[in-house]
Amino acid sequence: MGIILYELAGADPALRLSPHCWKVRMALAHKGLEAQGLPWRFTEKQAIAFSGQGRVPVLIDDEEVICDSWNIALHLEARYPDAPALFPGEGAIALSHFVNAWADSALLPAILRVILLDIYDCLDPVDREYFRASREQRLGQSLEAVVADRPSNLSALERTLMPLRQVLAEQDFLSGGAPAYADYCVFGMFMWARCSSATPLLDKGDPVSLWRERLLDRFDGLARSAPCLDTEHP
Amino acid sequence: MGIILYELAGADPALRLSPHCWKVRMALAHKGLEAQGLPWRFTEKQAIAFSGQGRVPVLIDDEEVICDSWNIALHLEARYPDAPALFPGEGAIALSHFVNAWADSALLPAILRVILLDIYDCLDPVDREYFRASREQRLGQSLEAVVADRPSNLSALERTLMPLRQVLAEQDFLSGGAPAYADYCVFGMFMWARCSSATPLLDKGDPVSLWRERLLDRFDGLARSAPCLDTEHP
């Protein structure tokens, strides 16, 4: 039955709005695997109840069900060892784990404070109430209050990007001369922003922006051709 | 003539106060190399003028002079390929580069805001004026003002530590089952704090603390036996 990926979608089902699902999309392409991406909404817990939990990405690979983007990457690497490596070299899983943790715990919250309301606006009406309530509880503020001070949120994002910028000024990809899973972990965050918001996060000459362009072009422009809100930066 | 390492020292020349020099010390031990550590003060620019710049670490390996901890690590890896690898596996240099950049640009400033005045107190009187003037200019505040709000500085450090904590809860070292240069990049920051300040930065059961303990014990307790201010945590 091939590979199926449940992905968070917006009101427009073609808009794919999860950074973690984007990590998986890029990992699948890296492995040269075709997958059917099924749009899913936050409130459709029923549709993925078979996975024993309530979040996406959920991957079905033949009969096997795998949740969580990190687990999915490890699964793909183990199951398709002859395809290009997501973790090239013996230390790569351990070190990529740190890059992934940094993307999730430092970069994601910094981007979130810029695009939170834009995400809300993209969502299907059925998801909006759930999204507002869960995020406002988590952040202890209204969505509007979180994004209110945009200059300060953008400058916090700038500070967060420092290690990424420093490294990408000296090498083409986080993984070296070619991208691998560590790159997709971080790139997923930028795809999330691109798909849900028209706010530019990076200046044109920024090494991070040049790296993002390289990844947008990868796999015949897979990421670049995905429907997005950031029409300023095709 | 063997290996010589110029290291930043305090009023007590046995106190070695540079995070970057600690990275190199651990890297040398990892390679099984003996080195003579020469104490150096900020204002002794003359003593390292032969290196063509004014900062430590400076390593002299036979006739060769290498500056900057990252360059020194690459040098050691290339020059001593038969000793244990600092960068195990093909992707390890590129990914460790990111860990190092994170340590320098995110972790270092977060720890600095807690221990800045303690560092000042450790310095040799000849260095104090230089240190105060250069740091106050860089930070745009008096040393006292930087550290004034300790609870808020400690909670910013907590947030910064999140990706590290997340990963070390699941694996013994950043590099996987055994430490390598990526670990020393981060551990150097904690040795800098330990040598210059009695302020505890980590709770006892914290995965980051347990990892630090493992590295303090490494190489027959090289780091643990170094003179330090953190006498609460021997």
Image: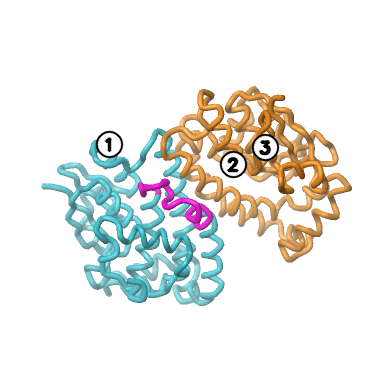
Chain colours: A orange, B cyan
Amino acid type, label 2? Asn
- Write down the residue under mark 1: B78
Mark toward the start of the polypeptide (3 vs 2) = 3
- Badge 1: residue crowd in 10 Å (few <14, some 14–19, many ≥20): few
Amino acid type, label 1? Ala
Q: Main secondary structure of the magenta part?
A: loop
Q: Which mark is residue A146?
A: none
- Badge 3: residue crowd in 10 Å (few <14, some 14–19, many ≥20): some
Q: Position of residue B94 (x, y in %)?
A: 43, 38
Q: Quadrant of residue A217?
A: top right
Question: As rendered, which of A105 and A220 lies closer to the eye?
Answer: A105
Could you say whether the residue bearing mark 3 is in a helix, strand or loop? strand
Reply yes or no: does residue B177 show up in magenta: yes
* 1 and 3 marks on the same chain: no
At a point 70% along the width and 35% down the height, the residue shown is A233
Could you say whether the residue bearing mark 2 is in a helix, strand or loop? helix
Cα separation, mark 1 vs mark 3, equals 44 Å
First to last magenta residue range = B164-182
Farthest-out residue, right: A125
Q: Which mark is residue A71?
A: 2
- Badge 2: residue crowd in 10 Å (few <14, some 14–19, many ≥20): few
Residue B219 lies, with reference to residue A214, above or below; the image says below
Would you say the residues marked 3 and 2 are in contact, meaning their CB atoms lie under 8 Å apart?
no
Would you say the residues marked 1 and 2 are in contact, meaning their CB atoms lie under 8 Å apart?
no
The C terminus of chain A, quarter of image: top right
Amino acid type, label 3? Val
Question: As rendered, which of B142 and B205 lies closer to the eye?
Answer: B205
- Write down the residue under mark 3: A65
Subunit of label 1 = B
